[in-house]
Amino acid sequence: MLHKQTVTLIHCKIYMGVVTNASAAPLTLKAEDVTAVPVGVNGVITPLTLTEEGVTVRRRSFIFELVSEDSMRIWSQKIQEYIDSLGRPKKLFVFVNPYGGKKSASKIFIDSVKPLLDDANIDYTVQETKHQLHAKEVAKSLDILRYDGVVCVSGDGILVEVVNGLLEREDWDSAIKMPLGVVPAGTGNGMAKSLLDAVGQSCTASNATLAIIRGHKQSLDVATISQGQNRFFSVLMLAWGLIADIDIESEKYRWMGSARIDYYAIQRIFRLRRYNGCIKFVAAPGYETYGEPANLEGEINGEVKSNFVQHKGYSGPALHIKDFNRKIEGPFLSVWLHNVPWGGEDALAAPDARLSDGYLDLVVIKDCPKLTLLSLMTEINKGGHVRSPHVLYFKVKAFVLEPGTQLDDPAKEGIIDVDGEVLARGKGTYKSHHKPLMTYDKIHIKVDQGLATVFSPSSI
């Protein structure tokens, strides 16, 4: 039977190695509430400062005086045995992206992440990313048997690279089971926000790190985007039209910080672009009336099969063209496909999205007056935009995007944005020396339910 040591020397509450102010009642220690384990007769726990809902948590050291060395040894051993039984990670591989967002990831790791990992006695290897796709390269060759999880101290981009790296391995089916943790340290932080907001926690590095330490896990859907032999694995979102234009073209104002999005959104709305095109989809149950019947005559009646040039890695699920029985014709202002609720810390893009429901949430705007659209955009921070009569919002299992030219300027096309990066760009868009992965043409998307695993604030 697990011994509970009651200490009357101090009046505080300890949980997960964190100390909070509490009433004047004596302290009762429970194993499930402790991360750090004291060593020696005078055991010391030194927790970290963070803010919970309505509770200010301060980092302090407390000395627990027990009657003997044997008491301390038994007390520590029993707590450690219980903690070990919870399946918490003991060794982590940590990516730190020093270039993302406000370039604060290194400081966030040192100030907020490292102290908690040290308190929890977790061994970790730190890898700073040196260039774009560095994390993907490392993930493709990482010895996954040495670690209990991979942590990304960054925005969402490094997580996406890691997922793609794991799924391009020959042993992808076991590699993708590696639990992934996200500590918000970038511009968007949509995945961290989605995980923490689901349990009412604020999107902070400390809360995210504690979730990783606790070791709770949940499944995460992964969408395979395919075009010919090319594949890209997405865990966040795809955008085409207004949202993609704002996200990508506002990069030239990055010096403004997060304000660049609002600033460029106003410019883009008052110089609105409409795009020709068509979307086809397999509607989720209950959403079969959205769109209109799709005429599949002339389409290949079969499967869109994978053809990885490398002949290794996950090729994605088979797509049956005959299943795409609904469509919506353009022109469009915006098409936005989401796997998680939050596109960023202040953008509740798809309030009904769930991380492992097997569906993608589709947000479509075909037409909308400019002033109404401006007002609608201000509702995104709390998800109110999906209630607008100008917005179609429903769930799909699979999706085909056939992007076209700008309605008012057929010489120009658009941008397809996936997880904050340019997947494809058409003629007349911005110039870049980076070649996109895909061409500005038809792409297919299908979701695999629960393919990946993430550390979560609670087990789901």
Image (cartoon, grey):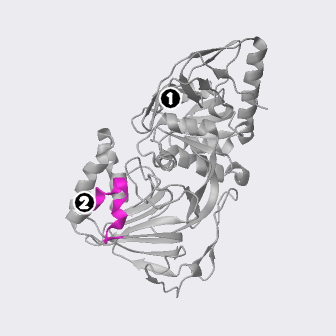
For the magenta stretch, what is the residue range? 376-391
| Three-letter code, disc 1 | Ser
Tell me if 142 is positioned left or right of 278 in this view: right
In-front residue for pair 172/204: 204
Asked if residue 387 lies in the magenta stretch, the reply is: yes
Residue 452 image position (x, y, % from top left): 63, 53
Mark 2–mark 1 contact, CB under 8 Å?
no
Quadrant placement of the N terminus: top right
In-front residue for pair 16/105: 16
Give the residue pinned by disc 2: 375
Q: Earlier in the sequence, mark 2 or mark 1?
A: 1
Asked if residue 184 lies in the magenta stretch, the reply is: no
Q: Residue at x 63, y 35 (%)?
A: 93
| Three-letter code, disc 2 | Ser
Residue 365 image position (x, y, % from top left): 34, 69
Residue 390 image position (x, y, % from top left): 31, 71
Label 1: few (<14), some (14–19) or many (≥20) C-alpha neighbours in 10 Å: many
Q: Specify whether residue 97 is in view.
A: no
Q: Which mark is residue 414?
A: none
Q: Measure the C-alpha gap from mark 2 to mark 1.
A: 37 Å
The answer to whether 244 is drawn above or below residue 329 in the figure is: above
Give the residue pinned by disc 1: 112
Q: Quadrant of residue 252?
A: top left
Q: Specify whether residue 161 is in view.
A: yes
Q: Residue at x 62, y 38 (%)?
A: 214
Q: Residue at x 34, y 47 (%)?
A: 251
The answer to whether 264 is drawn above or below residue 210 in the figure is: below
In-front residue for pair 441/190: 190
